[in-house]
Image (cartoon, grey):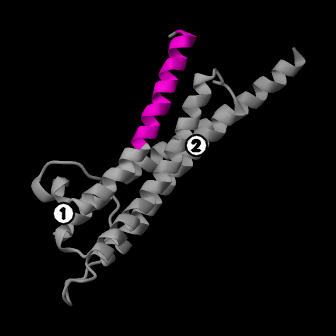
Amino acid sequence: MTTHRLARLSQGMAVVTLWFIVAMLLLNAAVWWFPEISPAANGYGIGFALTNGLIARLGLDVSGMPWWQTLGCILLSSVPLLALAHGLRHLRSLFNLYACGAYFSAAAATHLGKAGKSAAIWVVLSVVCEPLLSMWSTLREPPGHHVISLSFGSGYLVALFLAACVAVIAQILKQASELDSEHRQFV
């Protein structure tokens, strides 16, 4: 792949990443405000694991929630997504560096490492926010129907493993860029 083509591809990925961040947060809110678009409502549509899994498992009637409860659900389900968005922002910065030709730099390693750490934080926050979200979403249910749920699936294990791999690769890239910098000073 030519350098010019790689730069264009990196610029394109930076744009796609930005749109993905915005779409992810907006779609999560849309699933709560307009529950009919959720797969939990009719078997098809858009959604996110934490939100859809909880709505389907608990059999929530999201359309019957008052606005303040829906807003609380949006905020609680967005907390892990904000951590993921932070990581995607670093991934976008990494693509922008690549578009400028900075393939082998400490800054690139730093952005890659922060993207990996953010993915791990996203998993942890998803696990932590699920009980809070389940408690909040069943707040107005009659006594005996309040639910606190907690889950940890294989998808979370895979995400944690990939986050750890990315963090290790980032450290290797950082060390390699430092060695390259030292080498260039001697030459």
Q: Main secondary structure of the magenta part?
A: helix
Magenta region: which residues? Answer: 2-20
Neighbours of disc 1 within 10 Å: few (<14), some (14-19), many (20+):
some
Image coords of residue 147 (percent x, y): 26, 79
Kindly identify which residue carries mark 2.
Answer: 167
Magenta stretch encompasses residue 37? no
Q: At label 1, which amino acid type do we have? A: Ala
CA gap, disc 1 and disc 2: 34 Å
Residue 65 is drawn in which quadrant?
bottom left
**Residue at 33% across, 75% down:** 68
* Residue 82 drawn at (x, y percent): 47, 55
Q: Residue furthest right?
A: 186
Residue at image position (56%, 42%) is 90
Q: Is residue 119 visible?
A: no
Residue 25 x %, y %: 38, 52
Closer to the camera in the image, 28 or 153: 28
Q: Which residue is label 1 attached to?
A: 56
- Give the numbered dot on residue 145: none
User: Looking at the rendering, which quadrant does residue 56 occupy?
Assistant: bottom left
Q: In the image shown, does 51 or 112 lie closer to the viewer?
A: 51
Secondary structure under tag 2 reads helix
Question: Which tag is nearer the camera, tag 1 or tag 2?
Answer: 1
* Residue in the picture at 28% in, 82% down: 139
Q: Secondary structure at mark 1?
A: helix
Mark 1 or 2 closer to N-term?
A: 1
